[in-house]
Amino acid sequence: MADRIRFILNGEDIALASLDPTETLLDFLRLKRRLTGSKEGCAEGDCGACTVLVGRLVGGKLQYETVNACIRFVGSLHATHVVTVEHLAAKDGTLHPVQQAMVDCHGSQCGFCTPGFVMSLYGLWLTSENPSRAEIERALQGNLCRCTGYEPIVKAAEQVGQIRPSALFDPLERERANIIARLEEISTRETIAITGPDGRRLVVPGSVEGLAETLAAHPKATVVAGATDVGLWVTKQMRVLDPVVFINHLEDLQEITVTPDGITLGAGVSYSSALDVLRKEIPAFGRLIERIGGQQVRNMGTIGGNVANGSPIGDSPPALIALSATVTLRSASGTRTMPLEDYFIDYGKQDRQSGEFVESMFVPRPKASSHVAVYKISKRRDEDISALCGAFHVEADTAGTVTHIRIAFGGMAATPKRARAVEAALYGKPFTQATVEAARDAFDVDYKPLTDWRATAEYRQLTAKNLLTRFFLEVSGTPQELQRFATEEA
C-alpha cells in the first residue's frame, strides 16, 4: 500500500500525500504551480483552452496524448508525465517550431485559446509527419477559437508538419530517456490510498483484483476512468464525491482482442485506442467514434465508461446493442456476462450489483453480407452531444428477405433501447422501399421521446423514421434516389 500520487510535471518530480480527490489538473496547474498558460474556457472539456499533454509508459514506450486539464483529476496522474505549454520554448526564449509556426502564420489574435491550440498541434506533430488536412482538422476538433476562423492555425500545422522532432529543439525528444527512467521507478502495482484535507478519500488500485477488493469494501465509490462525464459532475454540478477510485492506469482493462468471432474491448479502452481496430473491423462503428467529442475527449474517455454510466444519449451503446454486444461485469466474488441491452434497466439505473464494475464488452463480428450503419444527429457535426443516435444491423438472404435485424437508438427513451416493433415489421419480409415505408409507423410504438433543448419530441421521432429510410437507400438505393431523399429531408 502506497500513500502518495507521484508524477512528473514538465521537468519536476511531484509527490502528493494529501489531495482533494476531485481536484482538477487545471486548478493544480494554475492555482498551485502558477502555470497559467493553460486557460479555463468552459470547464467541461469542450473548448480545449486547457489542453496539455499527458505521457504514460505503454509496453516500455512513452506515449503522449492531449487531454483536457479542466476535467482531468490529479488523482489520475500517477506514473505520468504532464507537459504544459510553458515547457516547449527553450530556456533562452527561442520558440518551439510549433509555436513559431503559429506566429509565422498569424494563428493567434486575442491569444486566449492559443496555448491550447499549440498543445493540440504539438500532440499531432509528435505523431504525424506531414499530416493531411483531414488529420489536422481531426486533431483540432476539440479546440474552439472565437477570432481567427481556424485557417491560419491549419496553415501553421501544415508548415510545422514538414519539420521532424529533434533533440536540438524539442524537449520531449531531448528528455525522453530520462523521463522513461524516472517513470520506471514509480510503481504502478501498489494500491494508493490518500485522504484529502477534508477527510475525503481517493484510491488508485494496483491491479484489477485490487479494484474488485476496493469496491467490495466501498461499494458506493465513484469509479473514474476518463472523467469526461464525471468531471462535469464536479465542475458543473458541484457534486462532492467520496471515495473516488481511479482506474485509467490499469493495463488489464485496456486490452483489445480480435478473433474470427469478434472483438473484446476492455472497459478501460479509450475511444482513441479503439479507433483503428473498429475502423478496420466495423467501419460504421469507427466512423461514429470519430465524432465523439474532440481528440482530447477521445483520448480520455472510454467505451466501458460510456456503457457503465448508462446515459440515454451515450453514443456507443446503440451501436453495441445493434451489434448484439455482451457486457461482462466483475466483482470480488466473480464475473457474469449478459446481453448489453439487458444491462440498461431505467433512467440512471443499470443491472450492476453492489461491488461490481464493467470489465469488458464483446462485439460479435458482423457477417460479410450484413449491412451496418450508425447515425449521430447533433446540432454541430463535431464535438457535440447527440440529439439522437441510431444504429442499424440488417442481414438478408439471396431473395432479399430480411433474416436478421437489430435497430437501437439513444436519445429516444430513458435508456438506449431497441426498436423491436420496427424490427418485427421488417423481419421475414422483403427489404424493399414499400416494406420500409410501412415500418416507419412502428417507431410510434417503440418510442415516446421527450422534448429538451437539444431537440423536440416531434423532431426526434421524425428523424428516427427518416434514418430508417436513409439506411435503406444507402444499402440499396441509387445515387439519384439518395439525392432526392436528401433534397426532401432538407
Image: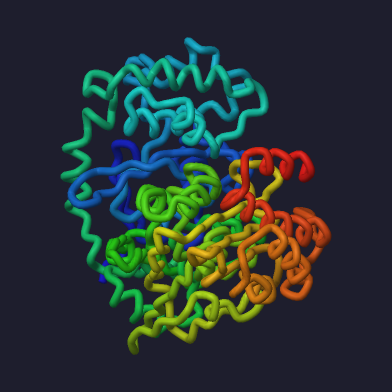
**Viewer-closest of 145 and 302:** 302
Exactly how many numbered labels are in the figure? 0
* Residue 36 image position (x, y, % from top left): 51, 34
Residue at 73% in and 60% down:
465
Query: Relative to 140, does residue 459 appear above or below in the rendering?
Result: below
User: Residue at the front extreme?
Assistant: 399
Can residue 233 be seen here? The reply is no
Query: Relative to 125, does residue 434 appear above or below in the rendering?
Result: below
Position of the N terminus, as image quadrant, is bottom left
Residue at 51% in and 31% down:
137
The quadrant where residue 341 appears:
bottom right
Left/right placement of residue 306 relative to residue 448 reads: left
Residue at 60% in and 41% down:
382
The quadrant where residue 380 appears:
top right
Left/right placement of residue 378 relative to residue 71 reads: right
Position of the C terminus, as image quadrant, is top right
Residue at 34% in and 89% down:
333
* Residue 15 image position (x, y, % from top left): 31, 53
Can residue 419 be seen here? The reply is yes
User: Residue at the top extreme?
Assistant: 104
- Coloured how? rainbow
Query: Relative to 356, does residue 437 appear above or below in the rendering?
Result: above
Left/right placement of residue 77 relative to residue 317 reads: left
* Residue 149 image position (x, y, % from top left): 63, 22
**Viewer-closest of 49 and 91:** 49
* Residue 134 image position (x, y, % from top left): 48, 30
